[in-house]
Image: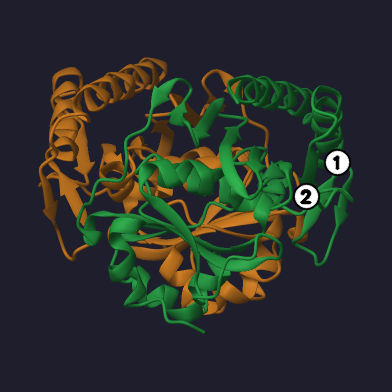
Chain colours: A orange, B green
């Protein structure tokens, strides 16, 4: 596992070099399901780059990737989960606040996760048997603080519509930050900068953070109380286990 | 003016060193008007530090500061406008995404502004007779792009309540980012990363960005259509002049 973890760290840094080199080029932007669901040629090429390296090094492993036909079942054998650019809208409009993410599972059990904030050059990695760190600095487990001294991260539309009581809960904390990337937001939760994160996202958006969070006292739950299916897009919350009861007072089951 | 601009750049960097040194200490946090309106001992000490330096170097100048009894009239003579920590909630909860800001006016005319993103070590400065730059890199004037390829920054509560049509306008762009600091958000507007910024803020929050924005094709307007009073907290928008007509289709006068 040590070798695989090292391989993943090297791979994500190589993918970041590739993305950084190419992000000054003219982007080819395509719309997916709707006008704000975008994909670029760089998302696709960055994923192809990672897939090729994984298939060469570990030909028997499976891959679940955001931008491809590689939809392995996360619970089936050795599975790499890839998000080549999380926060594509930020990538296109701001050129910052996007991440590359990798997670690795064996028979449904998360072994390690990686979130790489490309522009800030910050690599969060660990989980499973590995300590969680950012660029070599070990992260501390969640330490409880009063709610009114903490911020949360959220999807802007879910907050604005008070989805399942999200705005009710938000009124108990110092405020809401809308950063536009699950990876960037969840890395701030892991750092203890945001108390929790709420959004409607897919496995490649939350796999890496969820594995790292397990080590630091966080858990990923659906907001509706249904089980996490690790397949479809679901409304989820990434929260400290120690504050679960408090948070569930406001976040009502669907 | 050259000497004053240089003095301001040196001063803001010194204040940042001071804030960085002290931010690991135990903060003394006080509530101002309400639970999410905070001030810390470091806000106050950082302002005192800047005030002392200005009074020593320019004893005849006036000062308008967020955290003190120094409420000079911005239109009266030589006036320094200081925000020792913009984004105090971020400072307290995240330890990032806060800024130190300085603006300088003569008889109501902005001469230069500075926004310093302390943690990212990014100094935006210029306006008046000076080019606007970030750490020495000259910023380009606003270049028009389709609305549905751009993001806006906003105050989260104003967006959530569709204040004066803000959410209506937001539905025409790629999305909304809520960063929690006027200075950080407006520096992203100056960079061309965000199209515009909407919030209810005070002169020390918008003075620096407004002066720099003048050089790059941006203007600061109230959302209600009333004149900007440079004294009280007002709902404002920092927008490209080229998109004013388009934005005003949705942002309705009060």
- Give the image location of residue A63, x and y in percent: 20, 38
- Give the image location of residue A75, x and y in percent: 30, 48
Q: Nearer the viewer, residue B238 or B20?
A: B238
Q: Earlier in the sequence, mark 2 or mark 1?
A: 1
Judging from the image, mark 1 belongs to the subunit labelled B
Is label 2 in contact with label 1 (beta carbons under 8 Å)? no
Q: Residue at x 85, y 41 (%)?
A: B44
Q: Residue at x 55, y 63 (%)?
A: B199
**Mark whose residue sits in front, 2 or 1:** 2
Which element is circle 1 on?
helix
The answer to whether residue B119 is above or below residue A64 is above
As drawn, is A62 to the left or to the right of B109? left
The answer to whether residue B93 is above or below residue B227 is above
* Disc 2/disc 1 C-alpha distance (Å): 9 Å
Q: Which residue is mark 1?
A: B44
- Give the image location of residue A123, x and y in percent: 45, 26
The answer to whether residue A195 is above or below residue B157 is above
Q: Residues within 10 Å of mark 2 (few under 14, many from 20)?
A: many
Q: Residue at x 62, y 20 (%)?
A: B6
Which element is circle 2 on?
loop
Q: Residue at x 23, y 61 (%)?
A: B148
The answer to whether residue B54 is above or below residue B84 is above
* Res A225 seen here: no
The image quarter containing residue A214 is: top right
The image quarter containing residue A202 is: bottom left
Q: Which residue is mark 2?
A: B66
As drawn, is A97 to the left or to the right of A12? right
Q: Residues within 10 Å of mark 1 (few under 14, many from 20)?
A: some
- Give the image location of residue B105, x and y in percent: 64, 42
């Amino acid at each position: 596992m040590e070798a695989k973890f090292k391989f993943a760290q090297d791979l994500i840094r190589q993918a970041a070099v590739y993305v950084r080199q190419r992000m000054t080029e003219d982007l080819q932007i395509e719309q997916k399901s709707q006008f704000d669901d975008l994909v670029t040629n760089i998302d696709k090429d960055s994923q192809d780059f990672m897939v090729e390296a994984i298939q060469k090094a570990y030909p028997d492993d499976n891959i679940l990737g955001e931008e491809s036909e590689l939809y392995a079942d996360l619970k089936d054998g050795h599975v790499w989960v890839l998000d080549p650019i999380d926060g594509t809208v930020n990538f296109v409009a701001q050129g910052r606040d996007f991440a590359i993410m990798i997670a690795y599972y064996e028979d449904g059990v998360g072994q390690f996760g990686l979130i790489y904030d490309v522009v800030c050059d910050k690599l969060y990695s660990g989980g499973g048997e590995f300590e969680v760190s950012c660029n070599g600095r070990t992260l501390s487990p969640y330490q409880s603080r009063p709610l009114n001294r903490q911020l949360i991260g959220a999807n802007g539309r879910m907050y604005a519509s008070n989805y399942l009581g999200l705005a009710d809960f938000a009124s108990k904390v110092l405020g809401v930050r809308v950063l536009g990337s699950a990876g960037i937001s969840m890395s701030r939760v892991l750092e203890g900068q945001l108390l929790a994160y709420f959004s409607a996202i897919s496995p490649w958006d939350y796999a890496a953070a969820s594995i790292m969070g397990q080590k630091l006292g966080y858990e990923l739950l659906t907001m509706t109380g249904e089980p996490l299916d690790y397949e479809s897009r679901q409304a989820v919350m990434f929260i400290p286990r120690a504050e679960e009861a408090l948070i569930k007072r406001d976040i009502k089951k669907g």
